[in-house]
Image: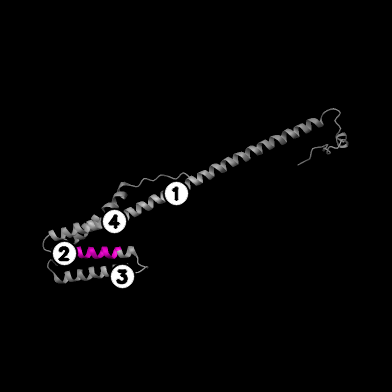
Amino acid sequence: MNQPITVPHPLALALPKVAPAVATSSVLILGRIWNANGAEHSVGNAALMIVLATGAAAAGACASIGRAGDGVLAGTCFAASGGLALAGVAGYADGISLPLLLWALATAVAYGLAARYWRTDRRDTVTFERRMSEKREDHSHIERIEAMRSRTQIEVAREGAAYATALAEAMTARAMLPGFDPTELTRAGLPELPTTPKEN
């Protein structure tokens, strides 16, 4: 039951921690690039981003309603709505202060939501490792019992084979004694002994 111990790469451990900041920073950068390419004070572009952000928020609300609501889909839709709103403000505003303020707010919210999932994931991982440890202990206990039983059976079989060999040697030695008559033993009430060994 020995399993190889795998150590995850440090980059694989750090990537989920920086993903929210990378996502919001990417949206801010793309919004500012869009701003530099003609989206500044463009009412049509702002209206488009408002419609898209509202549609994504409405989709998230619909996905979270009822017992059959999908939390992952709803979270994805709300994250898309927030990203579209941030991109719209970053593209429309002429200064950098408001986009940076919204970027900081969006990053804080993203980390707050991610921390909840990280705690849940860590709790599930600890529970899984505890369950696997208990199973390994149970299996190792069963393996020890089976090994002891096998050794006992082997020892009993060896003792039985040694006893059978000694008995056969004793019977052969007794049959070779001078004056040994198996018919006298039969008349005395003992079972008849074979005079010749059986051929296998």
Front-most of residues 189 and 88: 189
Give how far across and how far down residue 52 sits, in percent.
23, 69
N-terminal of the pair, mark 3 or mark 2, is: 3
Front-most of residues 170 and 149: 149
At mark 3, the secondary structure is: helix
Give how far across and how far down residue 135 sits, in percent.
47, 48
Residue to which mark 4 is pinned: 114
Give how far across and how far down residue 26 sits, in percent.
22, 58
Residue 145 among magenta residues: no
N-terminal of the pair, mark 4 or mark 2, is: 2
Query: Residue drawn 41% across and 49% down?
Result: 129
At mark 1, the secondary structure is: helix
N-terminal of the pair, mark 4 or mark 1, is: 4
Query: Residue drawn 44% across and 49% down?
Result: 132
Left or right, 75 with respect to 96, comes to: right
Residue 83 among magenta residues: yes
* Disc 4 + disc 2, Cβ < 8 Å: no
Magenta range: 75-89
* Disc 3 + disc 4, Cβ < 8 Å: no
Front-most of residues 65 and 98: 65
Report the Cα–Cα distance between label 2 and label 1.
Answer: 51 Å
Query: Residue pushed farthest top?
Result: 178
At mark 2, the secondary structure is: helix
Q: Amino acid at mark 4?
A: Ala
Determine which quarter of the picture holds residue 149.
Answer: top right
Report the Cα–Cα distance between label 3 and label 2.
Answer: 28 Å
Q: Amino acid at mark 3?
A: Cys
* Disc 3 + disc 1, Cβ < 8 Å: no
Residue to which mark 1 is pinned: 132
Left or right, 76 with respect to 28, comes to: right
Q: Amino acid at mark 2?
A: Gly
In the picture, the disc for residue 91 is 2
